[in-house]
Image (cartoon, rainbow, N blue to C red):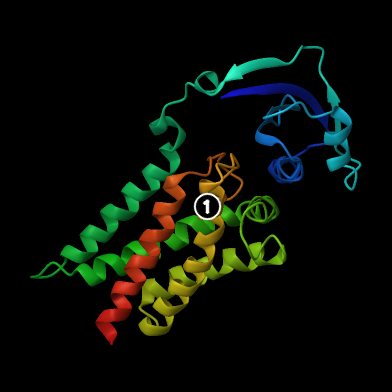
């Protein structure tokens, strides 16, 4: 598949939230496949399946005049998808892999305390660690997270405030699992919230939209992929298992 990658200058961005906002606005332009923004240099590399006029991209930012997009002096370059990135899978997802490793270790230790290995305790502690850790990164830049989340979540697309609410729901669920508060209600809320959340993730992955995953907020630039699906499915399956044991 042949795609075109154009490089543009973008001024007015001062933080990760600005970067997320610009990415979100430009991703709505028909034909845009991927956006890579260097916040420090103020440069955006936009990959498109067909030529898109600079005026069209500028129009996408018209409601936010502080962001100004202009062409660079470099000529557009044609690339094959195989040439786009040499970053390995492990390097790309290193932050999330480390978090999962730490949470898994704590969960296994908790499950192994006592005479018998308690899988239910292990899953509960894992889910607590998962929600608290992921909410922490979202809290570092709530505006940036809300902008990223609104680019694919089915509720946040229509109701941006849902992004802010979602971060606090994760934090509340993490605490609830940690203290084992009302297990049936906690697992039911998890099942419902994560089932809704995964819809937008599945749509993005199936449509091969190359956007940033908001799972770790706006702190890490992680691409949306099957990893995001696995995260959500894991929470759905664990909450469903624990619900079944209570029936």
Which sits in the foreground, 80 or 66? 80
Asked where in the image residue 93 lies, by quadrant, the reply is: top left
Residue at image coords 58%, 63%: 167
Question: What residue did someone put label 1 on?
Answer: 215
Asked where in the image residue 122 lies, by quadrant, the reply is: bottom left
Q: Is residue 50 above or below residue 181?
A: above
Q: Position of residue 40 (x, y in %)?
A: 71, 28
Residue at the bottom extreme? Answer: 247
Residue at the left extreme? Answer: 115
Quadrant location, the N terminus: top right
Q: Is residue 29 above or below residue 180?
A: above
Q: Is residue 215 visible?
A: yes
Q: Is residue 224 left or right of residue 105?
A: right
Q: Position of residue 132 (x, y in %)?
A: 46, 62
Q: Secondary structure at mark 1?
A: loop
Asked where in the image residue 53 lies, by quadrant, the reply is: top right
Which sits in the foreground, 180 or 49? 49
Q: Is residue 182 visible?
A: no
Quadrant location, the C terminus: bottom left
């Amino acid at each position: 598949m042949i795609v075109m990658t154009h490089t543009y200058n973008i001024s007015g961005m001062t933080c990760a939230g600005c970067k997320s906002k610009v990415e979100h606005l430009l991703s709505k332009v028909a034909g845009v496949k991927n956006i890579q923004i260097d916040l420090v240099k103020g440069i955006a590399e936009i990959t498109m399946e067909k030529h898109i006029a600079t005026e069209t991209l500028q129009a996408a930012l018209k409601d936010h005049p502080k962001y100004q997009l202009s062409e660079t002096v470099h000529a557009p370059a044609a690339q094959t998808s195989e040439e786009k990135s040499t970053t390995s899978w492990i390097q790309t997802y290193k932050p999330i892999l480390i978090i999962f490793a730490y949470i898994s270790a704590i969960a296994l230790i908790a499950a192994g305390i006592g005479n018998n290995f308690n899988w239910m305790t292990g899953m509960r502690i894992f889910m607590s660690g998962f929600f608290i850790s992921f909410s922490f990164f979202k809290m570092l830049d709530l505006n940036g997270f809300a902008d990223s989340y609104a680019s694919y979540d089915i509720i946040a697309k229509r109701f941006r405030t849902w992004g802010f609410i979602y971060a606090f729901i994760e934090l509340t669920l993490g605490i609830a699992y940690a203290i084992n508060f009302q297990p049936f209600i906690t697992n039911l809320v998890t099942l419902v919230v994560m089932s809704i959340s995964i819809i937008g993730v599945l749509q993005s992955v199936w449509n091969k939209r190359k956007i940033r995953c908001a799972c770790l907020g706006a702190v890490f630039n992680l691409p949306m992929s099957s990893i995001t699906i696995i995260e959500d499915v894991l929470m759905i399956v664990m909450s469903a298992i624990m619900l079944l044991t209570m029936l």
